[in-house]
Image (cartoon, grey):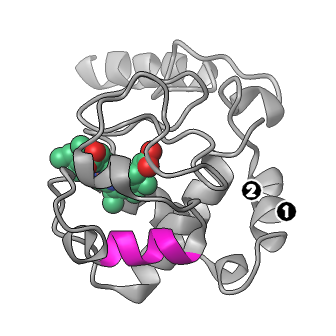
Amino acid sequence: MRQILLTLSLLALASCGQGTTPAQTPTSAAAQVAPGARSADEIQAALASLPAPYNEANFDDGRRAFAQCRSCHTINAGGANRVGPNLHGVFGREVGTAASFNYSQAVQDADFVWDADRLDDWLANPQSFLPGNRMAFAGIRSDEQRRDLIAYLMIETAEN
Ligand code: HEC
């Protein structure tokens, strides 16, 4: 009897089509994408359009690498500053110019525009790239992980 009840409740769950996430009832592949998020096809197209070597990056690994930044940085448009500034639109932006963020003197005195090469140097070793900055982060030693993370950021921090 117990076995039958269990089977029945499993069947009931399965018939929802979404046993693990009953709150969502997507009707198509597009509907599974959160508002503002990109579909797998859009991500592939965006990756392919990046300059080398970023067009060969692994987006999912980049997203995983961003876990190291997430506690201090948001990347969405209009996202809050946390310990670090919002990074939306960071590529092509003058260093130290996120709205309403109180940068260190080292960053305020710096004068360049963020591009992939600069971000790569910064992420490899923030303190040697810009001594005296206040980003408490040791750096990412793996070239591949920085490539994947930068590609992820190129896509996710872009205006959309
Ligand atoms: C412990 C918090 C912390 C972590 C973790 C962290 N950051 Fe930061 N980040 C900061 C702070 C604080 C600043 C501002 C530094 C300053 O003013 O000296 C900053 C600045 C930056 C800037 C310069 C922004 C600008 O407007 O010029 C970039 C780019 C950046 N971080 C990217 C990253 C990335 C990518 C990661 C993950 C690999 C990361 N940070 C991890 C705190 C953090």
Q: In the rendered structure, does residue 123 fall within the stretch colored magenta?
A: yes
Q: Please give the residue where the numbered disc 1 appears in the rendered image.
A: 45
- Figure label count: 2
Can you say whether 28 is above or below 126 in the image?
above
**Does the CB distance between marks 2 and 1 fall below 8 Å?**
yes
Q: Residue 83 sits in which quadrant?
A: top left
- Dot 1: what SS? helix
Looking at numbered disc 2 in the image, what kind of residue is underneath it?
A: Ile
Q: Quadrant of the C terminus?
A: top right
- Dot 2: what SS? helix
Q: In the rendered structure, does residue 108 fall within the stretch colored magenta?
A: no
Kindly tell me whether residue 58 is visible in this rendering. Answer: no
Q: Please give the residue where the numbered disc 2 appears in the rendered image.
A: 43
Q: Quadrant of the N terminus?
A: top left
Q: Position of residue 56 (x, y in %)?
A: 67, 82
Q: 53 or 59: which is nearer to us?
A: 53
Q: Residue 2 sits in which quadrant?
A: top left
Q: CA distance from mark 2 to mark 1?
A: 5 Å
Q: Position of residue 117 (x, y in %)?
A: 55, 78
Q: Position of residue 24 (x, y in %)?
A: 59, 17
Residue extent of the magenta highlight: 117-124
Name the chief secondary structure element in magenta: helix
- Density class for disc 2 (Cα within 10 Å; few <14, some 14-19, many ≥20) is some
Q: Is residue 104 left or right of residue 73?
A: left
